[in-house]
Image: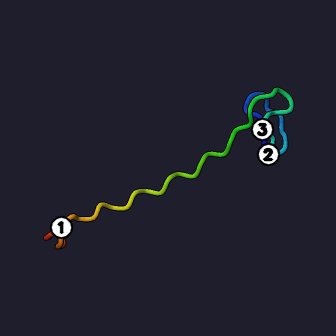
Amino acid sequence: MICTNCGTQFEDGNAFCPNCGTPAAQPAPAPAPAPAAAQPQYGYAPQP
């Protein structure tokens, strides 16, 4: 991992840069799945 503040390379898993103390960048969370397509609320399919 490389510090975004001072550029020091350090091991992954460190919470802070050992050189300057800047918090290590956390990996971005996985995006939430897209919501399902809206289903018609009627008992029949829409007409073309």
According to the image, label 2 marks what residue?
A: 13
Task: Say which quadrant the C terminus sits in.
Answer: bottom left
Q: Amino acid at mark 2?
A: Gly
Label 1: which secondary element: loop
State which tag comes first along the sequence, 1 or 3.
3
Query: Residue drawn 84% across and 40% down?
Result: 10
Image quadrant where residue 28 sits: top right
Image disc number at residue 42? 1
Image disc number at residue 23? none
Q: Are marks 1 and 3 in contact (CB under 8 Å)?
A: no
Q: How is the image coloured?
A: rainbow
Q: CA distance from mark 3 to mark 2?
A: 6 Å
Q: Position of residue 37 (x, y in %)?
A: 33, 61
Q: Is residue 6 left or right of residue 46?
A: right
Q: Is residue 48 above or below residue 10?
A: below
Q: Amino acid at mark 3?
A: Ala
Q: Are marks 2 and 1 in contact (CB under 8 Å)?
A: no
Q: Are marks 3 and 2 in contact (CB under 8 Å)?
A: no
Label 3: which secondary element: loop
Q: Residues within 10 Å of mark 3 (few under 14, many from 20)?
A: few
Q: Amino acid at mark 1?
A: Tyr
Q: Is residue 44 above or below residue 15?
A: below
Query: Residue drawn 29% across and 60% down?
Result: 38
According to the image, label 3 marks what residue?
A: 15
Label 2: which secondary element: loop
State which tag comes first along the sequence, 2 or 1.
2
Q: Is residue 3 left or right of residue 48?
A: right
Q: CA distance from mark 1 to mark 3?
A: 53 Å
